[in-house]
Amino acid sequence: MTYCVGILVEDGLVMIADTRTNAGLDDISTFRKLHLFEVPGERVLALASAGNLSVTQSVVALLNEGVANPETGAVETILEAPTMFQAAQLIGRAIRRVRAIEREGFEAAQLRFEVTFLFGGQIADGPMRLYMIYSAGNFMACSQDAPFLQIGEHKYGKPILDRAVTFKTDIYDALKVGLISMDSTMRSNLGVGLPIDLAVIRRNSCRTEVVHRIEAGEPYFHDLRERWSAALRAAHRAIPRPPYGPSAGV
């Protein structure tokens, strides 16, 4: 299991991903799930992955080495895609290519082909975009009305994002809320865990402003977790008790 979130606000893009993978209770490892492709001043792309680790690694490798365009026959890499839309299409083709290669083995082992990506960034003077790309290779775009997308174990972090993030949210407030949603997910699902990788990309900069890994024991993240827990306890104590029961006269 994993949890990744992308938040696209007016100021730019925040991408956050955990690093925990497991193949059973006694087989837990750490692998990077947030990948960056950057040519400073020309393009900056962020790709977060969830699903079968061998599939996601194969897709990322293909994006670097190149995928054939069925219309032109040319081999294209993600650093050559002229627009974000065409880069998302390239990722879809890479997913379908890996599926075609691995289908027989997956079917023989009775395994499901499961992979999902969050893909965001900006190319040259084109618009900044955030997409969710599915295992079939199709994709959907984030909108101003719903300025975030999640993959993996998303249900625990979504209510926080729903209540606190809008398109007008400051980019570092968006990062803070995204980390709170990650902490809430980690509290409820042991399949999601530290370290956490994050990237902040300012709109129209075409470069990463922040790339950081949060390790266990980092003071800021520890303080954030403690403050959020304390704020929740204070909030529920401040809300009046429900007017139900024998003493309510109903």
Image: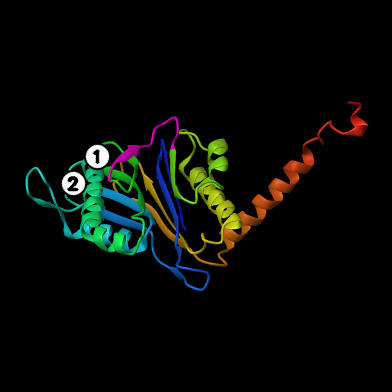
Q: Quadrant of the C terminus?
A: top right
> Please, what is the dominant secondary structure of the magenta stretch?
loop
Looking at the rendered structure, the number of numbered marks drawn on it comes to 2
Residue drawn at x 93%, y 32% is 247
Amino acid carrying label 2: it is Ala
Q: Residues within 10 Å of mark 1 (few under 14, many from 20)?
A: some
Q: Which residue has dot 1 on it?
A: 85
Do tag 1 and tag 2 residues touch (Cβ < 8 Å)? no
Mark 1 lies on a secondary structure that is helix
Rendered position, 153 above or below 131: below
Toward the viewer: 235 or 1?
Answer: 1
Rendered position, 175 above or below 64: above
Q: Is residue 141 magenta?
A: yes
Q: Whole-percent x and y of residue 131? A: 34, 42
Question: Which mark, residue 96?
Answer: none
Question: Which residue range is magenta in the image?
Answer: 137-147
Residue drawn at x 73%, y 42% is 235
Extreme-bottom residue of the structure: 26
Where is residue 65, by image quadrant? bottom left
Asked whether, in this view, residue 52 is left or right of residue 41, the answer is: right
* Res. 68 visible in picture: yes
Q: Is residue 250 magenta?
A: no
Asked whether, in this view, residue 178 is left or right of residue 65, the answer is: right
Q: Which residue has dot 2 on it?
A: 81
* Res. 40 visible in picture: no
Asked whether, in this view, residue 243 is left or right of residue 7, the answer is: right
Amino acid carrying label 1: it is Phe
- What separation in Å lies between label 1 and label 2 (alpha carbons)? 9 Å
Q: Residues within 10 Å of mark 2 (few under 14, many from 20)?
A: some
Toward the viewer: 44 or 116?
Answer: 116
Toward the viewer: 202 or 20?
Answer: 20
